[in-house]
Amino acid sequence: MLVLYGRRRIGKTTLLNRFMEGKQGVFYTAVRTSARRNMEMFGKRLVESLAPESREMSFGNLEAEFSFLTRKSAQERIIVVIDEFPYWAEMDGSLTSVLQKYIDTEWMQGQMMLILSGSSLSFMENHVLGEKSPLFGRRTAQIRLGPFSYREAGEFVPAYGPEDKAVCYGVTGGIAKYLSLLDDCKSLDENLVNLFFSRDGYLFEEPSNLLAQEFRSVSSYGAIIEAVAGGAGKVNEIADHVHIDGSSVSHALSNLQSVGVVQKRFSITEETNKKKIRYTLGDGMFRFWYRYVPEGVDMIQAGLGEKYYRAAVLPYLSEYMGGIFEEMARSYTLTAGIEDQLGFVPLNVGQWWGTNPATRTTTDIDLVALNKYDRKAAIGECKYKNEILDKKILDELKERNQLLDHRYEIVRYLLFSKSGFSNWLEENAEKENTILISLDQMYQ
């Protein structure tokens, strides 16, 4: 029994269809309808897939369908996929209990592989995998399917250079469906205009469509997401921005985390410090959309989306990509550490922020990699700008090493640059315990 779940458009159904190729089994996608109707349609798929010679056969109830599967799996190896499982289970409170009964008795001795898949992260985690679920402990594997990494996302547009590949990752968040819509035979600008800034663009209304499938109060959730996208990172800041009380905002943020839109972040060495919690958009497509599309809706609706893009989006893409580049750098650092390029293996890679006691100002460190067991660390700076990095950037980074927990020995400094490095840095990096990583190198 495999439980597969992940946000919409992540590629679950495509993955399952590819896995099913050439195999004996049944693939049923549940729909938002009555329990009775789902049961009837599931039965029809059973007959079509596993007993096509008996087209007139029908089932009166769920147990009759599961008993049929018992007989089939006793004779041969079969795969049973129920995609969008929450749609059916939410309408039939007995479905998980009946599944439990058959898993524990009839199917344990058979040759069945059961796959339950769903896009509702909270339902799958609480009502399928959770301790209170009748199915708790029955699964033999679980996969929370995540987005592609920046390198994997680049494989969707192999004709593009590193900078355009990075932007494609930054505006799609590595989501499979959105990446599949990109055409590297066209320019990056054409792709962005066609997808986001055209009336018939696939992603023009995508956030609203996704929120409508998950929540009733789309406008409230949209306002909260817009506040987070605009830089409000604390509950009170978001509440002031959207004029909703803090408890309601906290509840909404929890729901948005459950579907992968919002992310709660901690300063890496102070995960228990509630004062250092930040909420950010954890989904690249939502981040890009809420940053640029709302202000351009009137022009887009008037068919002037390309003009809006060139005036209000294109000049500021490098600024938008700054945060994305930091995330890419953290991913690169984790891999580099595993490949023994840092002198230690980082167990955590994140960001640090807080008050600099020397200047009494709020500051941050873009990248911090830690191993709490051998107490070694690396810190880094990331610049996605059209200018080379020079010695000043390294000096400023070294000044901040005192801000990190003094239990850690900083053994490496990492500089990530979109545009390269000065001659001084190139010549002195090794003796300064510094690793220089350009955007080009990140894609090699």
Image (cartoon, helix red, strand yellow):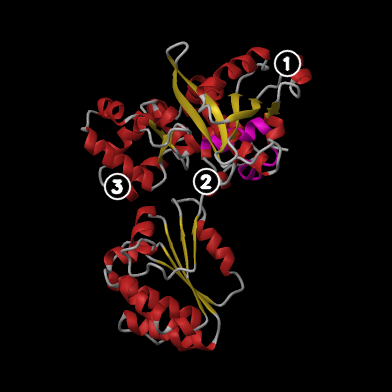
Mark pair 1, 3: CA separation: 51 Å
Residue 197: percent from left, percent from top: 47, 32
Give whichever of 418, 12 is nearer the camera: 418
Give whichever of 152, 337 is nearer the camera: 337
Badge 3 crowding class, 10 Å Cα cut-off, few under 14, some 14 to 19, many 20 or more, is some
Q: Is residue 247 left or right of residue 37?
A: left
Residue 55 location, quadrant: bottom left
1 or 2: tag closer to the N-terminus: 2
Question: Where the C terminus falls, by quadrant?
Answer: top right
- Which residue lies under the disc numbered 1? 422
Residue 155 location, quadrant: top right
Residue 60: percent from left, percent from top: 30, 84
Residue 169: percent from left, percent from top: 57, 38
- Classify mark 1: helix, strand or loop: loop
1 or 3: tag closer to the N-terminus: 3
Q: Find residue 175 and name its label.
A: 2
- Which residue lies under the disc numbered 3? 215
Q: Is residue 408 part of the magenta span, yes or no?
A: no
Q: Are marks 3 and 2 in contact (CB under 8 Å)?
A: no
Q: Which stretch appears magenta?
A: 151-171
Mark pair 3, 2: CA separation: 21 Å
Q: Is residue 160 part of the magenta span, yes or no?
A: yes
Q: Is residue 434 above or below residue 105?
A: above
Give whichever of 353, 382 is nearer the camera: 353
Identify the residue at horizontal 68%, vertical 17% (top origin): 388
Residue 106 location, quadrant: bottom left
Q: Is residue 104 left or right of residue 60?
A: right
Identify the residue at horizontal 52%, vertical 54% (top origin): 11
Task: From the image, give the main secondary structure of the stretch colored magenta.
Answer: helix
3 or 2: tag closer to the N-terminus: 2
